[in-house]
Image (cartoon, helix red, strand yellow):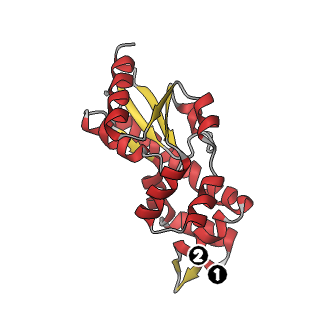
Amino acid sequence: MTKIIGLTGGIGSGKTTIANHIKSLGIPVYNSDEQAKKILYLPKTLKSIKSVFGNDIFENDKLDKVKLSTLVFNNPKLLNLLNQIIHPAVKVDFEKWLVNNINSPLVVKEAAILFESGSYKDCDVIISISAPQELRIKRVMERDHLTYKEVLSRISNQWTDEMRSKMSNYVIENQDIKKACAQTDDCIKILLNY
């Protein structure tokens, strides 16, 4: 039976780096955030977004992702509405992906909001990646060219490291990538052997 490992962590924690490390070990990894970005532009999704958010976030009938992000990351109710459109579609997409990877002893579902979306319930084991908030903010500012305030706003829409840690089987501290990868290897060895 394939074991589903949930991999989560707040924005800038380094969860994608850890996911890529796990992938390099030959373990299939489903990147929920990447798939959600693809699903966002599907005709069915765009139609739902337009019906909920109106035409103001569209330019020449194309979704303006910056306008949408600005809107939802400053309003938790609107973010929740967007999530109600995206999360069910990601769940279906993951289930299709899982069928194609059913022969692997372990698969990883990477998701920034694994707990917030409720998708942790589909996982057998949860690994959380954590890092000090200031380091996370610095990483995201450099990576996404956002302001300090914009990153802080996104962090405030996610669970804290402490909240995630309480509900996780394993917590990996990612201040030093070599140490974090070594901790990850230890987790994977344990999971492959039980």
Vertical side of 51 occupied by 186: above or below:
above
Q: Residue placed at 54% from the left, 32% from the top?
A: 122
Q: Residue placed at 37% from the left, 35% from the top?
A: 180
The amino acid type found where label 1 is placed reads: Asp
Please rate how many residues cluster around mark 1, counting C-alpha atoms within 10 Å: few if below 14, some from 14 to 19, many from 20.
few
Q: Is residue 111 left or right of residue 98?
A: right
Residue 36 image offset from top left, x and y in percent: 49, 55
> Toward the viewer: 92 or 136?
136
> Toward the viewer: 137 or 5?
137
Vertical side of 1 occupied by 86: above or below:
below
Q: Is residue 9 left or right of residue 153?
A: left
> Toward the viewer: 159 or 76?
159
Q: Which residue is under mark 2?
A: 67
For the N terminus, the quadrant is top left
Residue 137 image offset from top left, x and y in percent: 52, 56
Q: Which residue is under mark 1?
A: 56
Q: Residue placed at 37% from the left, 30% from the top?
A: 184
Which quadrant holds residue 190? Answer: top left
